[in-house]
Image (cartoon, coloured by chain):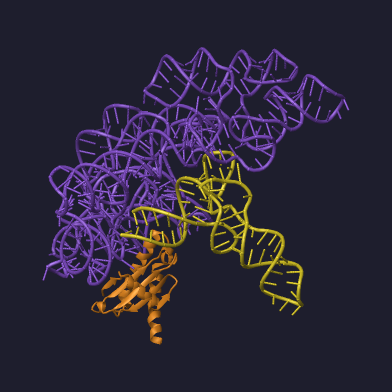
Chain colours: A orange, B purple, C yellow
Amino acid sequence: MDIQTIKKRRDFLKGNNAPYAAMPSVVVQSYIRTDEVVKTDESVMMGITCSKKVGNAVKRNRAKRRLREAGKIVLKEIGIKKTNYIFIARKDATIKVKFTDLCSDIETGIKKIYGQEKGK
RNA sequence: GCGGAUGGUUGGGUGGCUGCAGCCUAAAAGCUGAGGAAAGUCCGGACUCCAUGGAAGAUGGUGCCAGCUAACAGCUGGCCAAGGUAACUUGAGGGAAAGCGCCACAGAAAAUAUACCGCCUAAUUAAUUAGGUAAGGGUGAAAAGGUGAGGUAAGAGCUCACCGCUUUUUUGGUAACAAAGAAGGCAUGGCAAGCCCCACCAGGAGCAAGACCUAAUAGGGACUCGUGAGCAUAGCUUGGUUGUUCCAGACAGAGUCCGGGUUGGUCGCUAGAACUUAUUGGUAACAAUAGGUCGAGAUGAAUGGUCACCAAACACAAAGUGUUUACAGGAUCCGGCUUACAAAUCAUCCGCACAA
RNA sequence: CGGGGCGUGGCGCAGCCUGGUAGCGCGACGGUUUUGGGUACCGUAGGUCGUGAGUUCGAAUCUCGCCGCCCCGA
């Protein structure tokens, strides 16, 4: 499966209105793309947000790397086509938590979002 | 041994599996892949554009002297002052007899001087008045040379000795400055990180600079000014030209508004005032010569995950186990400054104590 | 990459240029007025002036370094 990165600012802003799941180490947002332009592109897209609250440049870089690595592993398993996933790093927790816990947080976060939608 | 001073170095290491970015390639394989501060963005340059060059002013900066440097507010060496027993450290360290301003409160007086308590003389019963004086008291951060002696009605650089100060001469030093001599009898309170004066330096903007490609036969529309025109040959007037003015010079087009398209790609982009070793010159900063080396180039932005062993520190402590390993991540490049930094380590020097 | 501003009682601001006493409004607390509350009046407490140094006799104020926040231009 092909995993692309989200590069446009407006794609991130769409995530603000989308359903989200706040886990101890990460916040997950996700929505299904409906744009005319990206209709032909069926790949899974992943974006990472890492604000200044997380810390200095070293901490932000480390959080981004961990999320990128963990997101890749998880989305290979349960990623849905034509869907955008946004992972937001949290202060201290994203860096300090064990890698396997980070993966499981992302997985349960995604399942939470789409489980709720089906329930409604 | 204890306590200090100065300057420097390292900034955990090795390997396996799996991933990322660049180069190379048809593909694979392979190679390379953050720092001493990459940081803060505080200075200085290179580079690019403003066609170019010069001058002045404004504004800003620097400020003992000499040297180094591409340049600097940097560095090196020296001088002076302050601190320290010392090694050594710190210092925006020119000018207050160019001018303006300020010095709260207290105090007589805060800088053209003046006189509260005093001291002395005269008038005078006392008190007071007139005059002399600035030694003493008191105020203050600071009071118009200091100490001692002479002198005097009491005093006073009034006189003398020493110290300080000013002017000047000589000697040493490239210089800052130092030393010695002579003269003056004291004139010049402090603040310039208040305005200012003097000397020196600086054109502006910044890699989102700038250049090219694509969409695209990319350009179009409106207005204003100019290429020139007017007068009467000469000459005069009139355009913009990176923030002001002027001069030289170059240019033939320039400016404003409306509307349309893009938010893409390529270059700039890393071989350089580079790093390193040796020699020579220099007290040193540094320079020269010779040899060797090539060490990131991303653009929602690359170093991650995991395992094993070793190293150091700490805790529990019999082996061993557990925890920790700082500050911190390139964004055009370089030289500095400032700030942050676990732990380890090297060299030189000083003081005290003890031993020989 | 470049430029500018701010930090002062619990909150919002003066004072800084031109150095010497930190003040105003709201709020807090106590009292008076009222049957009670509000209003009004009187009084009281509360500030390392972001932080570290320097200049000065003396720094919220002047100068430099650092920290935090905000804004602007390309």
In this rendering, the answer to whether B123 lies above or below A74 is: above
Quarter of image, res B143: top right
Question: Which residue shows up at 29% across the image and 75% down it?
Answer: A44
Query: Is B275 in front, or is B223?
Result: B223
Q: Is residue A73 visible?
A: no
- Residue B232, horizontal then vertical, whole percent: 14, 48
**Is residue A70 rendered to the left or right of residue B132?**
left
Question: Which residue shows up at 38% across the image and 79% down it?
Answer: A111
Q: Quadrant of the C terminus of chain A?
A: bottom left
Query: Is A27 in front, or is B132?
Result: B132
Query: Is B72 in front, or is A84?
Result: B72
- Residue A92, horizontal then vertical, whole percent: 44, 64
Question: Which residue shows up at 39% across the image and 84% down it?
Answer: A117
- Residue B206, horizontal then vertical, whole percent: 31, 54
In this rendering, the answer to whether C46 lies above or below B216 is: above
Query: Is B135 in front, or is B345?
Result: B135
In this rendering, the answer to whether B159 lies above or below A56 is: above
Q: Is residue A48 visible?
A: yes
**Is residue B86 rendered to the left or right of residue B59?**
right
In this rendering, the answer to whether B180 lies above or below B214 is: above
**Is residue B107 rendered to the left or right of residue B86?**
right
- Residue C65, horizontal then vertical, whole percent: 45, 48
